[in-house]
Amino acid sequence: MSRDSFYCILDLIGDHSVFHNNSPKPQAAVFVQLAVALDRFGHEGNRACLDRSMLLWGISHGSMVNYTNRVMIALESCMGQEIAWPDRQGRATIAEHFAALGFPGCVELVDGTLVKLSQRPRDDGETYFDRKSNYSLNVQVICDQHKRVIYFFAGMPGSCHDLTCLRRSGLWRRLDSAQLFDRGQYLLGDSGYVPLKRLVCSYKRTGGDMDKVSFNTCIAHARIGNEHCIGILKARWHSLKEIRTQLRNARENAYVIRWIRCCIILHNFLIWRNDEWSDEDHPIELERDVDIRPPLEGIRDVNRRGIQRRQEVQALCLEINRRPGRSAVPLTLRSCARMYIIWFMKSNALDICSGPCSLMTAMSAVRVVCKTAIDRSVRQSAVNRCVPIERDESRRIVNSRIRDRMRPFGRKVEY
């Protein structure tokens, strides 16, 4: 955070009544209380302990807690409008941005993240134990193209599926509301959700269908903004990587949610202020935490209109990306090679091998091809830089690798 942004926040919350009382002993200066709260928001682990802050600021434990609580109250009161759903004009502007990426009608990006807890909650602590072997809370984050969080829902245990958490949120009951979405507008999510009328998600299983693979790749390119949003949020405010508190009752649970809300308010405010983020000093850690487990409920009750809507969006997305003058559908060499190897295994691998070890031989050949199909130089140029390639080129490369690897088995491979 820059010095100008700090003083701007100080001007916004400095006149709040929580910093003034009728006691003969006046409170500490507002800028000191704000600095203490920001210091606690921005540290995790041992650096977030009260003993370290006590030595740094020269104040007692109770004073640090009081300073932080006052700043949280002031932030929610004076800057709570930083988290707001866009109006009709704002949604139209967002839709124009995603229309250029092949998703006309997309207005927001949705994803879930885990906020780690330093201790096991007292009541039903086993439900907070997530798939990463940590005690955590599940937080659903919805952001726009500028990486501003416009809606979040927190409080569910970390073991809950993303779809289950979204079903518990207030947004779920208002998905069909005309105040949130216009006609033809929807959210864009990953494979952790199910297709709905207002929610388009990627495919869990493509089955070797290259159109589905292309559609999943297009969604990944459009949704990278949400991954960046969560990464910047946790990189700015390290306390969200591990909150040092206990969850023993509903009041403490509400306190953690307020803590998360204040960090998101500050995140949105700094983006609005164009307070630039330095990736060199603080690298962003992109989350790869797509939950492959089925949700606890509703997985079989998939909306048919949602599936039909996803098919319509898929056809329109592929049509836009395959128009003349545009680059090819962003299929990386790795995804093309992987899907072609699956096709090869289904169609040819079992036919060219005979004998009792035919399946083992085919699996060994495919396993070797998966490891060596793409050279390091090709991976760096085509995958890391996301350079689109032609499908025939990727098939030619994989064919050559398969042909070379199948020669030791004494089989002739023809195409």
Image (cartoon, grey):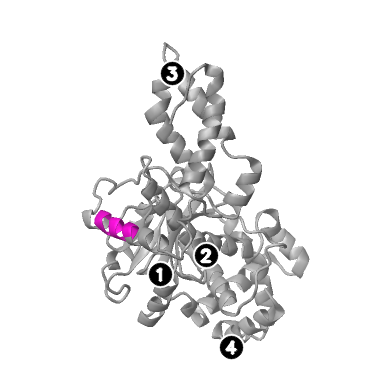
Earlier sequence position, callout 1 versus callout 4: 4
Left or right of 350: which side holds 366?
Answer: right
Q: Are marks 1 and 4 in contact (CB under 8 Å)?
A: no
Q: Secondary structure at mark 3?
A: loop
**Which disc number belongs to residue 99?**
1
Residue 291 lies, in percent from the top left, at 44, 46
**Which disc number belongs to residue 353?**
3
**Which disc number belongs to residue 260?**
2
- How far is disc 4 from disc 2 in space, using C-alphas? 23 Å
Pair 3/4: label in front? 3
Pair 1/4: label in front? 1
Earlier sequence position, callout 3 versus callout 4: 4
Which span is picked out in magenta? Answer: 307-315
Q: Are marks 1 and 3 in contact (CB under 8 Å)?
A: no
Pair 1/2: label in front? 1
Q: Secondary structure at mark 4?
A: loop
